[in-house]
Image (cartoon, grey):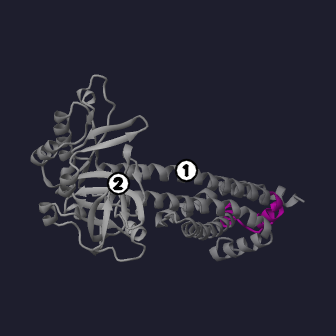
């Protein structure tokens, strides 16, 4: 009898496993849960990391973001004695950065303040950004209606504004905002355009990334704001109002190529360090954030994969225990096969074939559930998940490998039995 024929081994393996369906099903559960958890966890991790990377990428990998930061004043600070706190970026900073930063193609100064905005009876508080006409191109925003700020608006200080899409829905309640007049802290502005949802994440204080893509901001010409309000404003607190002077709240520098960003950042740091006694500014480089996010993603996937792999190891141990029990129950069968001419290699391959069928079947079922769970998570919670071929390949290959490794010992134990003693077994 030729026990080495593969098709016969497969047929015998299915026959043997079908005699103990419940046991085989319970054995596969460890592999199913292991594969499912690996695929699901890697998909969730990949989705979260890819979403963060996309938002950072859209901020502009060729941009350098500089923000004014308020630092605690010293007791003998002269500006404090005068009752005016002055800090942050200045017009001189922008002028010198435009002159000395290499490979600079655009400099976008901004004032970012929070004001009450009113249209007829509707009123809310939102961020108002006084900026330049090329802000739209630098920040990858998209126009939905009308136009953005123009060079003539800047030149003449025209009282016009562009509103975010969400603000337009809330403030104008479905009506066309183009041509309407709204009030920004009692100053009248004519709406000339509507900007779509934010195309990138926003940076909050402490350089934390906000993942809110809804645009509820208002954009006005920088010169218009300067003519109406200037550089001074009042910061209110429980102790009263404090006059502050901030010339520029934010400054975005755009470099011609990614390869030149690092050299440009070094120049930015030198200029700002020379101009400021205190570090009343922060520098954010999206390119560096992208690299950090990629490294974080790699470590995150390793951790998730390691945790999920424990389930696979547990499943492999379960297969080994079941196969050891099977070997004990089939001792007489092993003796008969050896007596009919089966070699030790035949016995090893026969038991490994059963182990392989269990692992492949459990792995396939685990892959199916592993694909369905991320889809269900996305549908139920709007959390982004990404199914990738490497996650499927790694989960399936590791499950099969672990199962075969843990199945070798029971198979060898069966093959090393003495045929005579096995025949005597009851």
Q: Residue at x 52, y 60 (%)?
A: 44
Q: Is residue 317 above or below residue 356?
A: above
Work out whether residue 410 can be spotted. Answer: no
Specify whether residue 365 is painted magenta.
no
Q: Quadrant of residue 52?
A: bottom left
**Quadrant of residue 270 in the image?**
top left
Relative to 32, 246 lies left or right? left
Residue 85 position within the rendered picture, expressed as x and y whole percent measured from the top left: 27, 35
- Pointers 1 and 2 in contact (CB under 8 A)? no
- Left or right position of 311 against 426: left
The percent position of residue 130, horizontal first and vertical second, equals: 25, 56
Q: Which mark is residue 136?
A: none
Could you tell me how far apart the alpha carbons at marks 1 and 2 are, in whole angstroms? 49 Å
Rendered location of residue 13, percent (x, y):
71, 71
Q: Quadrant of the C terminus?
A: bottom right
**402 or 155: which is nearer to us?**
155
Q: Which residue is found at the position 67% from the left and 63% from the top? A: 355
Q: Which residues are magenta?
A: 328-353
**Residue under numbered circle 1:** 306
- Judged by depth in the image, the label closer to the viewer, 1 or 2, is 2
Whether residue 273 can be seen here:
yes
- Mark sitting earlier along the chain (1/2): 2
Q: Label 2, secondary structure: give it.
A: strand
Mainly helix, strand or loop, the magenta region?
A: helix
Q: Nearer the viewer, residue 91 or 117?
A: 117
Around disc 1, counting alpha carbons within 10 Å, would you say few (fewer than 14), some (14 to 19), or many (20 or more)?
few
- The answer to if 333 sits in the magenta stretch is yes
Q: Which residue is mark 2?
A: 115
Q: Is residue 255 above or below residue 196?
A: above
Q: Nearer the viewer, residue 17 or 49?
A: 49
Q: What's the residue at 49%, 64% (across, down)?
A: 384
Q: Residue furthest right?
A: 426
């Amino acid at each position: 009898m030729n026990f080495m024929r593969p098709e016969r081994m497969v047929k015998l393996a299915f026959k043997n496993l079908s005699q103990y369906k419940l046991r085989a099903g319970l054995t596969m559960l460890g592999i199913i849960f292991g594969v499912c958890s690996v695929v699901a966890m890697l998909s969730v991790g990949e989705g979260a990391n890819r979403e963060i990377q996309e938002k950072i990428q859209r901020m502009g990998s060729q941009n350098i973001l500089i923000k004014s930061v308020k630092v605690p004043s010293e007791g003998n600070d002269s500006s404090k004695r005068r009752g005016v706190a002055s800090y942050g970026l200045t017009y001189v900073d922008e002028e010198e950065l435009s002159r000395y930063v290499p490979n600079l193609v655009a400099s976008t100064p901004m004032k970012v303040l929070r004001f009450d905005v009113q249209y007829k009876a509707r009123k809310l508080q939102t961020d108002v950004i006084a900026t330049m006409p090329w802000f739209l191109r630098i920040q990858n925003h998209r126009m939905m209606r009308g136009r953005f700020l123009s060079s003539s608006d800047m030149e003449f200080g025209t009282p016009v504004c562009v509103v975010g899409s969400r603000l337009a829905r809330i403030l104008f309640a479905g009506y066309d905002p183009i041509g309407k007049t709204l009030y920004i802290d009692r100053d009248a502005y004519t709406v000339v355009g509507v900007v779509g949802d934010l195309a990138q994440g926003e940076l909050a204080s402490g350089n934390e990334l906000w993942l809110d893509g809804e645009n509820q901001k208002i954009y006005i010409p920088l010169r218009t704001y300067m003519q109406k309000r200037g550089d001074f404003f009042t910061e209110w607190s429980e102790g009263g109002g404090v006059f502050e002077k901030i010339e520029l709240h934010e400054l975005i520098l755009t470099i011609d190529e990614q390869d030149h960003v690092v050299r440009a950042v070094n120049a930015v740091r030198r200029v700002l360090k020379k101009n400021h006694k205190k570090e009343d500014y922060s520098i954010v480089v999206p390119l560096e954030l992208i690299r950090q996010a990629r490294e974080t993603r790699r470590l995150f996937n390793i951790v998730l994969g390691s945790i999920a792999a424990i389930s696979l190891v547990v499943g492999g141990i379960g297969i080994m225990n079941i196969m050891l029990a099977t070997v004990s129950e089939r001792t007489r069968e092993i003796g008969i096969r050896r007596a009919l001419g089966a070699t030790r290699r035949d016995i090893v391959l026969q038991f490994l074939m059963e182990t392989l069928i269990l692992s492949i079947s459990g792995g396939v079922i685990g892959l199916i559930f592993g694909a369905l769970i991320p889809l269900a998570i996305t549908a139920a919670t709007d959390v982004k998940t990404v199914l990738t071929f490497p996650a499927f390949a790694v989960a399936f290959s590791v499950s099969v490998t672990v199962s075969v490794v843990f199945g070798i010992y029971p198979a060898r134990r069966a093959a090393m039995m003495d045929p005579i003693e096995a025949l005597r077994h009851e």
